[in-house]
Amino acid sequence: MRNLSLKKTILYLLIVIIIFFLDRISKLYILNIAEKDGFVDIYVNNFLNIILVWNSGIGFGLLSFDKSIIYNFVTILIVLINIVILYLALSYNNLKGYFFIIILGGSLGNLFDRIYYSAVPDFIDLNYNNFHWFVFNVADIFITVGILCLILVELFFNKHELNDENKN
């Protein structure tokens, strides 16, 4: 692992904290509505609704199981993946490190919910002509954006490296 500067470490920590708290604030707001009204069903426009769905699986409700042993195994797996993501973030001194930190911030938000509530509250419902995308939350947005940015960086750098090889 490369030498970490204090400035970089503090910046990474701030990014993770900001993402974590944006996620927590949004979820607490929705959970307070649910507690007060008994449900959450907010029509925003033709493409967006706010509803509360409890997700016991991973991203977008995948791998949802009722058995606690499988749930606990998936949770432990997520913790291990977060450790790998942290290692990768600290290993890079370029944009990739920031994208891994963005993913980590979102993942820690959802991991907190898995441990505290035994499920993750999802509430953003995108839809078009009665086709509904998976219900998701703010942490999922950061995870998805981080992954998409990593893919774009890989495609850009691989293309750049191929061009350099072809010139030689």
Image (cartoon, helix red, strand yellow):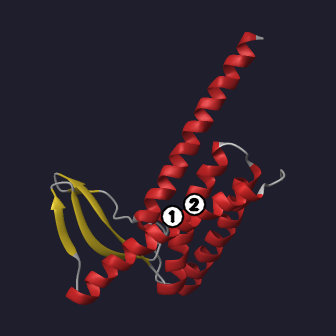
Q: Amino acid at mark 2?
A: Ile
Q: Residue at x 51, y 45 (%)?
A: 148
Q: Quadrant of residue 163?
A: top right
Binning the other alpha carbons within 10 Å of mark 2 as few (below 14), some (14 to 19) or many (20 upward) gives some
Nearest the viewer among 60 and 52 is 52
Q: On screen, 152 above or below 128?
A: above
Question: Mark 1 falls on what kind of element?
Answer: helix
Give the number of the disc on residue 19.
1
Image side of residue 158 versus residue 110, left or right: right
Q: Nearer the viewer, residue 8 or 47?
A: 8
- The number of numbered badges drawn on the structure is 2
Position of residue 14 measured from the top left corner of the image (x, y, whole percent): 60, 63
Residue 114 in the figure: left or right of residue 157:
left
Residue 84 as seen in the image, left or right of residue 107: right
In depth, the one of 109 and 65 nearer the eye is 109
Question: Tag 2's secondary structure?
Answer: helix
The amino acid marked with disc number 1 is Ile
User: Is residue 22 in sight in this rendering?
Assistant: yes
Q: CA distance from mark 1 to mark 2?
A: 6 Å
The x, y position of residue 106, in whole percent, is 52, 64
Could you say where residue 5 lies in the image, as x and y percent from the top left?
A: 78, 55
Residue denoted by label 2: 15
Residue found 23% across the figure and 82% down from its top: 39
| Residue occupying image coordinates x 55% and y 37% | 152
Q: Are the residues tagged 1 and 2 within 8 Å (C-beta)?
A: yes
Q: Where residue 143 sits in the image (x, y, percent)?
A: 51, 57
